[in-house]
Amino acid sequence: MWSRRSWMHAVRTKIVLPDSGPLFSFVAVPGGLDLLLAPALPIVLTDCVAWEATRSGSDTAQAIRAWIDAHPDAISVIETELGQFRIARERAGIAAKKDRRNIDETTIFEALAEGDVGEGPFLFLFEEDKFVDPGFYGRYPVRSVTTLGFLVGLERSGLIPSADSVFAAMRGAGREGVKGVIIDRPRRPSREGADTAWRP
């Protein structure tokens, strides 16, 4: 099972994956998952997000699991009470599909509320063009970025030659539903001078 790990960096922005969608989009292209590591920032996901991404045992799921396991110093999988409850019910075959809605995001909020993720700032990477505004935003600066927005940031930092080409490859590899919306914005100004600047 996933182990509990977290960082306590007070200033480094942490990339938070509130759902498994970005993992499926990045794994769809050769070397795509490593693009998530390109900014050299810690990556955080919960046990539930990792479970959603790897439970099928498909080639894609195995690739995601192998990538997570290969980078223990960069990727933190946080165990949560809700995540463990959901995973146990799914393994027992008694989990209702309707209860799956927003569960990944809820486990992230649990981990943040419990302090298991450490201090911010946080960069939330998501695939939709909207996101719930949780209460912890009042504690740390938070930036929201879409998959395409993240790729554009990598391009502007000189880490990839073309965001459009990577995004097109994702869609061409079965991720047609990923929205072509560029969002890369802070949710609120910092109170104490820290920021959510994430690009190298």
Image (spheres, rainbow, N blue to C red):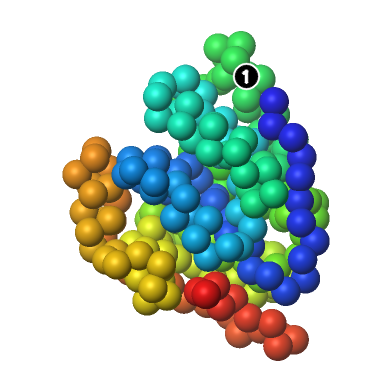
- Which residue corresponds to mark 1? 89
Considering depth in this image, is 136 or 148 the residue closer to the camera? Answer: 148
Up-down relation of residue 85 to residue 32 (above or below) = above
The single residue placed furthest to the top in the displayed view is 92
Q: Position of residue 60 (x, y in %)?
A: 40, 30
Q: Amino acid at mark 1?
A: Arg
Quadrant containing the N terminus in the rendered view: top right
How many numbered marks appear?
A: 1
Residue name at image x 61 percent, y 54 percent: 43
Q: Residue at x 41, y 21 (%)?
A: 58
Question: At 38% across and 73% down in the image, what residue appears?
Answer: 158
Instruction: Specify the quadrant of the image occupied by residue 187.
Output: bottom right
Q: Is residue 108 visible?
A: no
Q: Is residue 111 above or below residue 183?
A: above
Q: Secondary structure at mark 1?
A: helix
Residue 177 is situated, as x and y percent measured from the top left of the image, at: 26, 46
Q: Residue at x 60, y 38 (%)?
A: 70
The percent position of residue 195, horizontal first and vertical second, equals 63, 81
Whether residue 119 is visible: yes
Dot 1 crowding, Cα within 10 Å, few <14, some 14–19, many 20+? few
State the image quarter where residue 165 is shown. bottom left
Q: Is residue 72 left or right of residue 177?
A: right
Q: Nearer the viewer, residue 14 or 92?
A: 14
Horizontal placement of 27 versus 108: left or right?
A: left
Residue 191, image quadrant: bottom right
| Viewer-closest of 190 and 158 | 158
Vertical comparison of 42 with 51: above or below: below
